[in-house]
Image: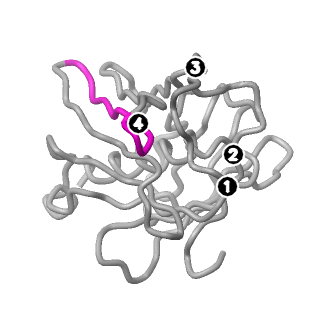
Amino acid sequence: MAAGFVEAVLRSGSVGIMSDAQLPPPGTYRAQRSSVGAAMLGATAFSDSWKVVDSAGETCLSFQYHMHLTSQEWAVTDAHGNAVAKMTRPAGHIHWTYEIDLSAGGHVTFSKQSFAFTHETWRLQGTSSGDVDLNGDTTDHNFQFVDSSHNVLATVSRPWVSVSEAIDVEVSGLDPVIALCAVVALDATEHTKK
């Protein structure tokens, strides 16, 4: 991974995005928290949001947080404001669960699979690669997405030095929008638990 940045290969699966949404082309990406105050308070704030930038520093995707009475929601848009996905954390689940709805009709569930404090296990269900597990340190954002054959589909790391809170994701075999949704969900979970 070059200097903590990411190489992303766009989806090869059957799930697509609506035609007017502009997904970032394959390249280098970094997810950055736009509202640093929320991280410092240890909670997801009303204005908490993330942006995904490419190697030139141009915004490709944005995540905007919305709090509802019975759920939390993130609207994912491209650089032109077109809807790419919606990620929701519905109320009423024993394990942390996030529902990811892609604008073209795909649906993925991202959920915590165990209550272990030392080694959390998380799973993406419904991807074009089948069930995808996370291996590594999820609380410090240093982990990999792996499929059932143990192929690494994406690698996530947090840079040691960053002006704002940032997370790098190298995607090779998973939809980058789904991978980035999972990263934002994990971060929201960690800040909520503090």
Residue type highlighted by circle 1: Pro
| Disc 1: which residue | 26
Tell me which label, 2 or 4, sits earlier in the chain. Answer: 2
Residue 104 is marked as 3
CA neighbours of label 3 inside 10 A, class few (<14), some (14 to 19), many (20+): some
Q: Quadrant of the N terminus?
A: bottom right
CB under 8 Å between discs 2 and 4: no
Which structural element holds mark 2? loop
| Vertical order, 74 against 62 (above or below) | above
Return the x and y of residue 123 as percentages of the image width and height: 60, 38
Residue drawn at (33%, 34%) of the image: 74
| Disc 4: which residue | 76
Q: Main secondary structure of the magenta part?
A: strand
Which structural element holds mark 1? loop
CA neighbours of label 1 inside 10 A, class few (<14), some (14 to 19), many (20+): some
| Vertical order, 118 against 13 (above or below) | below
Mark 2 and mark 4: span between their CA atoms? 16 Å
Mark 2 and mark 3: span between their CA atoms? 15 Å
Residue type highlighted by circle 3: Ala
CB under 8 Å between discs 1 and 2: yes
| Disc 2: which residue | 10
Quarter of the image for residue 36 reads bottom left
Tell me which label, 1 or 4, sits earlier in the chain. Answer: 1
Return the x and y of residue 163 as percentages of the image width and height: 30, 77
Front-lying residue, 112 or 187: 187
